[in-house]
Amino acid sequence: MRTLPDLKPVSGQQDLPVIQKTGTSIGKIAWSNLGDFVAVGLSWETENKTEILRFYYDGRTLTAVDARDPIQIPSLAFSFAWHPNDKQLAIGTEGGTVIVYDVATGQTESVVGHDGRVHTLSWSRDGRLLFTRGDDGSLRVWDYDPEQRNKLTLAITLRQDTGAIHAIGLDPDGDGVYTGGTNPNIFYWPKDRYSSDAILERAEKMVDRNMTRAEWMRYAEKDKDRQQHYQRTFEDLPGLFQ
């Protein structure tokens, strides 16, 4: 702990040693939204795992909460972010997996999110959307509903032209997101690109029409030799259960 702007040690707060063995490094530090907890991610390179330690902050000193029983992640975590309610932690791994960890219950919800490292994650203000970015150059938007069996479902995948996405900034008004990375440009994604209502509106325009001759032959041809199985033709459509 240091004071700003002079970076002097905080009176009464000793530095806390958290690395006990070689081959371990601190990969990420994140404050809770209320500022009363800080999470520290320890990357165990040789064992390909991550331990997340939590420290309670009372406004003066940091106190270890679960040093003897840290949160265990069976892969190297590269990024994490607190849910707005501070009850869940979103974690992105080196291998592309996105994990939502419930701090109270210890339950996890995990999905394969990206082809490669998940650089950063961000929650929407209401906690209903999770934005993830990765080496594959995609911005993925996930619907999060803790009451559903599948708590994390992919809403849409947005792709920039080239390069990995390393950072994101949410519009303060909630109308869109900005992304930046290895591409020299900053990209802006308005909300109507990824909101469920906008996706369904685009889907209506696609399906509320007569089929073309080629589509009729593909989906409704009576001759089984000429009929083809249904194939998904529009990746941005939500799942059929929605």
Image: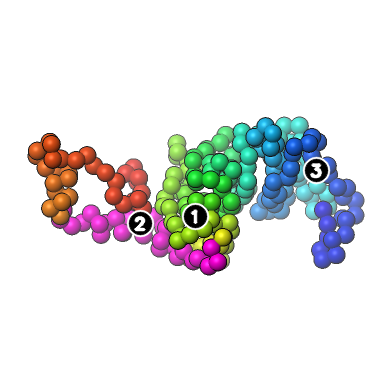
Q: Secondary structure at mark 3?
A: strand
Give percent across and percent down for residue 168. 56, 59
Q: Which residues are magenta?
A: 183-211
User: Mark 1 — residue?
Assistant: 137
Determine the residue positioned at 45% across, 38% down. 150
Q: Is residue 93 left or right of residue 12?
A: left
Q: Is residue 91 left or right of residue 16?
A: left
Give the tally of numbered discs: 3
Question: Disc 1 or disc 3, which is closer to the eye?
Answer: 1
What amino acid is at disc 1?
Answer: Gly
Answer above or below: position of 39 versus 169.
above
Distance in Å between CA atoms under marks 2 and 3: 46 Å
Answer above or below: position of 135 versus 107.
below
Give percent across and percent down for residue 214. 15, 51
Give percent across and percent down for residue 131. 52, 53
The first of marks 1 and 2 along the sequence is 1
User: Mark 2 — residue?
Assistant: 199
Give percent across and percent down for residue 222. 9, 39
Q: Is residue 237 magenta?
A: no
Residue 85 shows up from this direction? no
Rendered image: mark on residue 74: none
Q: Nearer the viewer, residue 177 or 173?
A: 177
